[in-house]
Amino acid sequence: MSTTARVTAEAIVRARAAICDVARHTPVLPSSTLSERCGGPVVLKAENLQRTGSFKVRGALNKLAALGDGCSAGVVCGSAGNHAQALAFAARERGVLCEVFMPALAPIAKAEGAAELGAIVRLGGASVDECVAAAQARADEAGLAFVHPFDDPDVVAGQGTLGLELLQDIPDLTTVVVPIGGGGLASGVAIAVKSALPHVRVIGVQIATCAAFPASLVAGVPVQVHGGLTIADGIAVKRPGELTLGLIAEWVDEIVVVGEDEVAEAIVLLAEKAKLVVEGAGAVGAAALLGGQAGVAADGTTCVILSGGNVDPGLLAEVARRHETEAGRRLVLFTRVPDQPGALARLLDLVARSGANLVDVEHLREGVGLHVRETAVQLVLQTRGRDHAEQVTRAVGEGGYAARVVS
């Protein structure tokens, strides 16, 4: 049976009817920043504002509708987090018990989110693939209905309902840039959009740390990659599904790959300019536009799908600090001061008069070659940008302190 015979535009239309009482029709927001930087109209599909914080609830709801009484004993899944939360939410809405298997290093916010929605959360395993295998074994053991995160025609059809919203909300749609992990969202959206508008170009985006589709498409069969820790954990799928690989090959026009640093910068830009909190997996499309891996359409509108917003606050803070440093608005200075009363105060007075804001100060007395009567000091400062950071560094040096910028 061909893949297209199993997932059709008609199935996606039916899925919309099955999930519309719960899933939100999320907004499409213009992005003047991306439009200006990329040279054409760009809009953002804010699926990070979807219930449970990602598109995954669409597929979960549609799978439960397709199962009907087949899930009366409960459902189980393996997931990096977003699918787990989505299935937990859908199960609660439909009055069904739910268990989820998540990697040991899954984001805390996602694991807690699934538990708060009533799911039994089982942490363990090094990857999504291991968790999926554990969930399948649990389904066989306890008579639960297994819900795959992407390699399932009902799940793909549910994710495809997002594409129907794009058709409704963007009259001049010509390009869609969509994240790819397992391929359920990208294939579902591509089927929905291109069945109605064959000229629309669909570009899938993977994270370089775990980009399994390029080699799999060349080989014609799913090829597993080693993967590793990534800021885009939501799409860190090491092996494409049998179903989704065929769908991606047939319906998606191009796949591009972005790096970790590019995604980190995209997260900050979306927060700063669009006022949207987007996780790494959800920001890869914006990263591809900013990095030039994907281009905007010559005519019409390019839509970037922000697939999720479930990011740990700690990671968000780290990304923001990194951006501040890269932009020159966060300066770390290392210097030495005499180990006597008032020496540090004089240094800090120099910093204050230069207009920098002190964030942190640390004395370092070990591991540094120091005179017995001096101490090393590391200052973390907020500045107004690179030029101001250079002025502050120069002022400290002219004040008699040999300062070194710590990268």
Image (spheres, grey):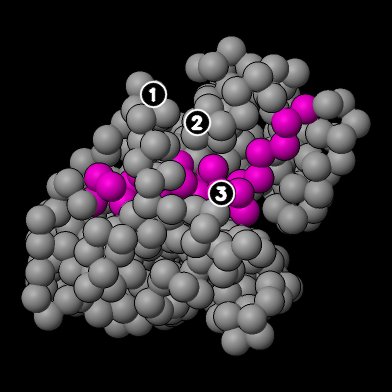
Residue 178, image quadrant: bottom left
Q: Which element is circle 2 on?
A: helix
Q: Name the N-terminal-most of marks 1 and 3.
A: 1
Residue for badge 2: 61
Marks 1 and 2 sit apart, C-alpha to C-alpha, by 8 Å
Judge by depth and name the residue closer to the eye, 355 or 210.
210
Q: Could you tell me residue 57's position as x and y percent?
A: 47, 35
Q: Which residue is mark 1?
A: 22
Instruction: Name the dominant secondary structure of the magenta segment.
Output: helix
Write the residue at 15% across / 47% down: 169
Alpha carbon of mark 3 to alpha carbon of mark 2: how far?
13 Å
Q: Is there a contact, CB below 8 Å, between mark 1 and mark 2?
A: yes
- Disc 1 marks which amino acid? Val
- Does 319 appear in magenta? no
Q: CA distance from mark 1 to mark 3?
A: 20 Å
Height in image: 339 above or below 9? below
Residue bounds of the magenta highlight:
144-166
Q: In this rendering, would 96 be left or right of 384?
A: right
Checking the image for residue 153, the label placed there is 3
Q: Is 259 located above or below residue 75 in the figure?
A: below
Q: Is residue 197 left or right of residue 69?
A: left
Magenta stretch: includes residue 147:
yes
> CB atoms at circles 1 and 3 under 8 Å apart?
no
Extreme residue toward the bottom, this view: 218
Would you say residue 143 is visible in this rendering?
yes
Which quadrant would residue 123 be assigned to in this image?
top right
Q: Earlier in the sequence, mark 3 or mark 2?
A: 2
Residue 39 or residue 275, whichever sits in front: 39
- Residue occupying image coordinates x 42% and y 69%: 251
Q: Which numbered circle lies on residue 131?
A: none
Is residue 302 at least partly visible in the picture?
no
